Image: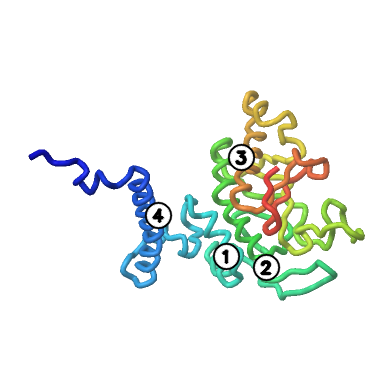
């Protein structure tokens, strides 16, 4: 007696029904996996190395990886966590009392940076997030670029100032209706030049490639390439980076900032 194919329950399930069942099973598995992982971490049953744990504190001594941006952002957004990370950098600084100097001006959770991995000239007043980002940029973007293009480190950075109660690209003083600069909250630093260990001085005004990155590479201009890499690297560690290609007001410096909108120009 021949079997009727219709007696097979798998054959009775329409193709569209099987797809819906498999889809539902996949969705359930996808939703359950992160929940089980989170439960395992919370209960200690699942141990994740700090390097791969997004909730572990930022390790400023560890080479950046795919989680560094998230950990840095988290540290910048939590004052206590930011200060804890800053304390690990080895930089010398004084804590500044919170203050308001004018409408939209003043700073909180800020430091006066007395000593860093490079000489800074006048000690800048920076918010903790800004100081932390500066450390990460100097160590993991600026110095590697200097070693690559000149086989020597940067020993000094020339800056045009940090905290200043002013508006965007308008100089000192308040302009009715204009937006406050990130400088007004100690969340910005303007970098104008670098000095290498050999004593060579490289300024943004003179060495930035006005014809673009392709021209700098074709002429093998090491100073231009260093500045290009320093600018590009800054975009990994700051929320906002503006350079000479942005507008004439930035022709002689890099504007580096935390907070605000993300921009890399």
Residue sitting at the far top:
218
Between 18 and 186, the one nearer to me in the picture: 18
Label 3: how many Cα within 10 Å (few below 14, some 14–19, many 20+) = some
The location of residue 112, given as percent across then percent down, is: 69, 66
| Label 3 SS | helix
Locate the C terminus by quadrant: top right
Q: Are marks 1 and 2 in contact (CB under 8 Å)?
A: yes
Marking on residue 111: 2
Between 168 and 217, the one nearer to me in the picture: 168
The location of residue 152, given as percent across then percent down, is: 56, 41
Give the mark, 1 or 4, whose residue is nearer the N terminus: 4
Q: Name the residue carrying label 4.
A: 27
Give the mark, 4 or 2, whose residue is nearer the N terminus: 4
Tell me which corner region of the image, top left, top right, bottom left or bottom right, holds residue 3: top left
Q: Are marks 1 and 4 in contact (CB under 8 Å)?
A: no
Q: CA distance from mark 1 to mark 2?
A: 10 Å
Query: Residue at point 71% right, 45% down?
Result: 193
Give the mark, 2 or 3, whose residue is nearer the N terminus: 2
Tell me the mark number nearer the camera, choosing from 4 and 3: 4
Tell me the mark number nearer the camera, choosing from 1 and 4: 4
Between 135 and 241, the one nearer to me in the picture: 241
Q: Name the residue carrying label 1.
A: 86
176 sits to left or right of 1: right
| Label 2 SS | strand
Give the mark, 1 or 2, whose residue is nearer the N terminus: 1
Q: Name the residue carrying label 3.
A: 229
Label 4: how many Cα within 10 Å (few below 14, some 14–19, many 20+) = few
Query: Residue at point 79% right, 73% down?
Result: 100
The location of residue 105, given as percent across then percent down, is: 80, 67
Label 2: how many Cα within 10 Å (few below 14, some 14–19, many 20+) = many
Q: CA distance from mark 1 to mark 4?
A: 42 Å
Q: Are marks 4 and 3 in contact (CB under 8 Å)?
A: no
């Amino acid at each position: 007696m021949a079997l009727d194919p219709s007696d097979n329950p798998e054959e009775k399930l329409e193709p569209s029904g099987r797809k819906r069942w498999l889809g539902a099973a996949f969705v359930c598995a996808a939703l359950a996996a992160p929940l089980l992982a989170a439960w395992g971490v919370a209960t200690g049953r699942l141990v994740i190395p700090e390097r791969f744990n997004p909730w572990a504190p930022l390790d400023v001594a560890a080479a950046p990886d795919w989680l560094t941006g998230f950990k840095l952002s988290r540290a910048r957004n939590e004052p206590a966590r930011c200060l804890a990370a800053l304390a690990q950098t080895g930089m010398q600084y004084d804590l500044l009392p919170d203050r308001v100097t004018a409408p939209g001006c003043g700073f909180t959770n800020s430091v006066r940076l007395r000593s860093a991995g490079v000489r800074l000239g006048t000690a800048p007043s920076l918010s903790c997030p800004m100081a932390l980002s500066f450390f990460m940029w100097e160590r993991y973007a600026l110095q590697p670029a200097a070693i690559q293009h000149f086989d020597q480190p940067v020993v000094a950075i020339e800056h045009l100032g940090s905290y200043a109660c002013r508006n965007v690209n308008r100089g000192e003083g308040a302009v009715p209706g204009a937006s406050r600069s990130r400088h007004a909250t100690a969340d910005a630093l303007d970098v104008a030049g670098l000095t290498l260990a050999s004593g060579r001085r490289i300024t943004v005004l003179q060495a930035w490639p006005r014809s673009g990155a392709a021209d700098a590479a074709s002429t093998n201009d090491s100073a231009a390439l260093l500045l290009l890499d320093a600018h590009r690297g800054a975009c990994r560690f700051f929320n906002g980076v503006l350079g000479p290609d942005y507008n004439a007001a930035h022709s002689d410096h890099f504007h580096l900032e935390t907070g605000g909108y993300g921009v890399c120009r």
